[in-house]
Image (tube, helix red, strand yellow):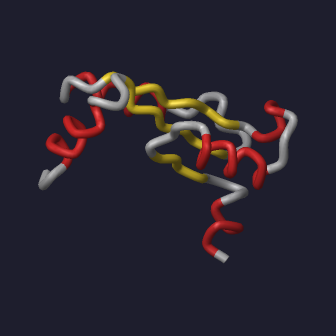
Amino acid sequence: MGQGPRLWQEKEALTKTLKLGLIGDHIERSRSPLLHRLAGRQHGIDVQYDRLIPRDLGQDFIRVFEACRTGGYAGINITYPYKERVLA
């Protein structure tokens, strides 16, 4: 897996939890948070994987996306209907 574990060890000095997120609508039952936490556990990494639903946060997609950029997220996934906006 290349440099993955080494990069995590370098980041570990900054944080003990890898903060990830999923932006989308109708993702309340998404299994992604569980799958990412389990994968992290298998590799000794504590993973926080947040479901970020703009409507529930009272914000539009752009504000949620920008908050991820400044909110300590190491990575985010974007799904319907916002994926089309990012790819455009």
Q: How many marks?
A: 0
Question: From the viewer's perspective, is 22 left or right of 38?
Answer: right
Q: What residue is shown at x 52% (from left), y 37% (from top)?
A: 72
Q: What residue is shown at x 70% (from left), y 58% (from top)?
A: 82
Q: Is residue 34 above or below residue 7?
A: above
Quadrant location of the C terminus? Answer: bottom right
Question: From the viewer's perspective, is 51 left or right of 6?
Answer: right
Q: Residue furthest right?
A: 58
Q: Is residue 84 above or below residue 73?
A: below
In the rendered image, which quarter is residue 46 located in? top left
Give how far across and how far down residue 54 sits, in percent. 78, 41
Question: From the viewer's perspective, is 47 left or right of 85?
Answer: left
Give how far across and how far down residue 6 sits, in percent. 15, 43
Nearest the viewer among 70 and 5 is: 70
Q: Residue furthest bottom?
A: 88
In the rendered image, which quarter is residue 85 located in? bottom right
Q: What residue is shown at x 67% (from left), y 54% (from top)?
A: 80
Give how far across and how far down residue 86 sits, in percent. 64, 67
Question: From the viewer's perspective, is 50 left or right of 46?
Answer: right
Q: What residue is shown at x 46% (from left), y 33% (from top)?
A: 19
Nearest the viewer among 34 and 16 is: 16
Q: Is residue 42 above or below residue 82?
A: above
